[in-house]
Image: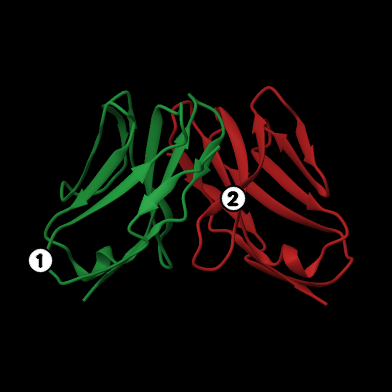
Chain colours: A red, B green
């Protein structure tokens, strides 16, 4: 069974700082790795999807990398803003549309 | 393009009752997955439907069931509700084994 771990569980940074969120998974046979953002009480917003054949994906200030051999993915956020405050979740898909989620990193960006 | 729509957004039910939640996927998406999110267990996969057939099922009791209609809309049913079923129920749609898009969720409270 795929297990996904996210470190740290919570992170507080001043506005403008660059930061890295970590995600590790136990089963390297993932089909893809997806990063989501969740605001309190809301659904999940897809941020980036990395296919198993890819090493990284970028969207604006966000960059996600995937290293299947070591079972790790990172989400890099550049020049953080207060609007980035949310919980960030990574999820691995094992072929079918069955996502295994990490427990998330709660990010607070202080103005 | 309309996103994933879940109804209702909020529900309060009494122990022992049953409940039906609805999910309308993005137009053209034939895969619909359901997840349960609780503070203690995080996000857990319930089941996935594709072309009206259940393809995958998570580790939940038989009280949790679902179905998918020919227009890809899906419903999830929980019978004999327990207090522990209180959670945010999220639905995701995808176009094959690719990026998953989530709805805003249905917040179920069992009293």
Task: Compare residues A44 and A35 and report the one nearer the observer.
Answer: A44
Task: Kindly tell me whether residue A66 is visible in this rendering.
Answer: yes
Vertical side of A14 occupied by B33: above or below: above
**Chain letter of the residue carrying label 2:** A
Up/down of A28 relative to A13, above or below: above
The answer to which of B76 and A21 lies nearer the viewer is B76
Foreground residue among B58 and B67 = B67
B87 displayed left or right of A81: left
Tell me the number on the disc at residue A54. none
Name the residue carrying label 2.
A45
Report whether mark 1 lies on the same chain as mark 2.
no
Callout 1 touching callout 2 (CB < 8 Å):
no
Report the residue marked by disc 1. B16
Quadrant in which residue B13 is drawn: bottom left
Residue A2 visible in the displayed image? no
Q: Quadrant of residue A57?
A: top right
Q: In the rendered image of this protein, does residue A13 appear above or below residue B5?
A: below
Front label number (1 vs 2): 2
Q: Is residue A105 left or right of residue B29?
A: right
Disc 2 element = strand
Secondary structure under tag 1 reads loop
């Amino acid at each position: 069974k795929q297990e996904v771990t996210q470190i740290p569980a919570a992170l507080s940074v001043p506005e403008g700082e660059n930061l890295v969120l970590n995600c590790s998974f136990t089963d390297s046979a993932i089909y893809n790795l997806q990063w989501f953002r969740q605001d309190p009480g809301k659904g999940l917003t897809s941020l980036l999807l990395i296919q198993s054949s890819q090493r990284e994906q970028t969207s604006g200030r966000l960059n996600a990398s995937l290293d299947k051999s070591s079972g790790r993915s990172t989400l890099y956020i550049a020049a953080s803003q207060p609007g980035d405050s949310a919980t960030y979740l990574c999820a691995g898909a094992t072929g079918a549309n069955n996502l295994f989620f990490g427990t998330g990193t709660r990010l607070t960006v202080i103005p | 393009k309309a996103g994933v729509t879940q109804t209702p957004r909020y529900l309060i039910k009494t122990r022992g009752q049953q409940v039906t939640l609805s999910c309308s996927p993005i137009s053209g998406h034939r895969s619909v997955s359901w997840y349960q999110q609780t503070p203690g267990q995080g996000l857990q996969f319930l089941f996935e439907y594709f072309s009206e057939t259940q393809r995958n099922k998570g580790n939940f009791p038989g009280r949790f069931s679902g179905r998918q209609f020919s227009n890809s809309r899906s419903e999830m049913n929980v019978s004999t509700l327990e207090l522990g079923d209180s959670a945010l129920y999220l639905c995701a749609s995808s176009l094959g084994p690719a990026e998953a898009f989530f709805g805003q969720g249905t917040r179920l409270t069992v009293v």
